[in-house]
Image (cartoon, rainbow, N blue to C red):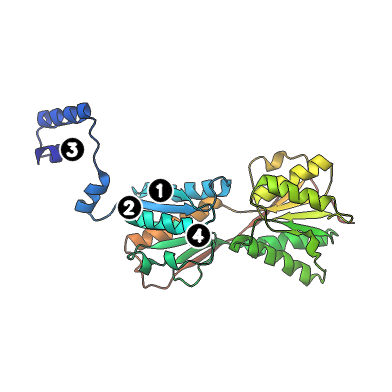
Amino acid sequence: MTVSRALRDDPMVLPETRDRVLEAAQQLGYRRNELARSLRVRGSSGMVGLLVTNLANPFYAELALGVETLCAQRDMKLVVSNTADNVERERDLVDDLVARRVDGMIVVPAGTEQRHLAPSNLGGIPVVLAARRAVDIQVDCVMLDDYDGAHQITSRLIEEGHRRIAFVGPPAAWTSAERLRGFRAAMAEARLPIDEALLRCEQRDVATAEVAARELLNLEQPPTAFFCANSRNTIGTYRAMRAGRNRCSLNGFDDFELADMLDVPVRLAAYDTRAMGRHAAELLLARIQKREPMDQLVRQVVLPTTIVQYGGPMPLGS
């Protein structure tokens, strides 16, 4: 009991006794078992889980920083895991986090099969979804206005005279599907046909995006403009354009580091990724701290996008 009190800096322990205990602990390499202590002291691990689909994507690093900032202010630790956009791996990681007694989870879901994320299936552990909407489960969500950002950029391209606009992006998760929907809506409102040969929706990384963009640029009737559904596809498309010395209009979703240093003009739908992380953490911590009971109506936060442009005037359509 004296050792336990000394290690938690109990003022009832004499200073010389505390010093002897701390010296012995240091010699033995003793570290306190926080998980075991939490079970006894408060029934809480003090940990929050964050599951993302692709740690190589800078978007998720910024998201994690936003979550971690708020968690640190509340003396909570963040555990980050990568699902590789695989639902089965996501299930396994969720089970592991539950076994480790996390107090709550923020998840970027890998698919539309999400029943394993329902708090009722997790012993009441609260869950908040980020970047993608909830499907058939009642949980809080924080998302971007993906549709509006894509619609705005496509509308500007049409106003600039472009008619052959290519769309390149990752497989149709919620975000890319919404961006494609915004693209299609703007074209439909302008009564412009969409050439399906100009759509590429399978590129998860820069290398495959570059290959797809090269194929489009080598068509008999190539596009005069590109709309890229994320930063990985924008960078890959830029590399293809630079290699072929093409001067298409380059547009995308997601601002990214060094975008202002490209040797071609680029227009992007930008947003505050860290703010998304902070909003998700706020919703989750409110549930954890019982300020908002689980049966309260779920909340959905939609963050706006802004259009930014680098490198001078954009090329006009012909």
Mark 1 or mark 2, whichever is nearer to me:
2
The residue beneath circle 2 is 100
Residue 316 occupies quadrant: bottom right
Give the mark nearer the N terminus: 3 vs 2.
3
- What's under tag 3, amino acid-wise? Leu
Q: Earlier in the sequence, mark 3 or mark 1?
A: 3
At mark 2, the secondary structure is loop
Name the residue located 77 percent from the left edge and 44 percent from the top edge. 240
Residue 65: percent from the left, percent from the top?
A: 48, 46
Please name the residue that numbered disc 3 is placed on.
7
Numbered disc in front, either 2 or 4: 4
The kind of residue tagged 2 is: Arg
Q: Position of residue 136 (x, y in %)?
A: 48, 73
Q: Earlier in the sequence, mark 1 or mark 4?
A: 1
Q: Distance of mark 3 from mark 1, alpha carbons?
A: 26 Å
- Measuring 37% from the left and 54% from the top, which residue is drawn there? 97
Please report contact status of discs 1 and 2: CB closer than 8 Å, yes or no: yes
Marks 3 & 1, CB-CB < 8 Å contact = no
For residue 280, above or below residue 193: above
* CA distance for labels 1 and 4: 19 Å
Q: Quadrant of the N terminus?
A: top left
Q: Position of residue 108 (x, y in %)?
A: 50, 57
Between label 3 and label 1, give the one nearer the viewer: 1
Instruction: Check the picture and name the quadrant holding the C terminus.
Output: bottom right
Camera-near label (3 vs 4) is 4
- The residue that label 4 is drawn on is 87
Query: Mark 1 or 2 closer to N-term?
Result: 1
From the image, tell me which residue sits under label 1.
79
Amino acid at circle 1: Val
Coordinates of residue 106 in the picture (x, y in percent): 44, 57
Q: CA distance from mark 1 to mark 2?
A: 10 Å
Camera-near label (3 vs 2) is 2
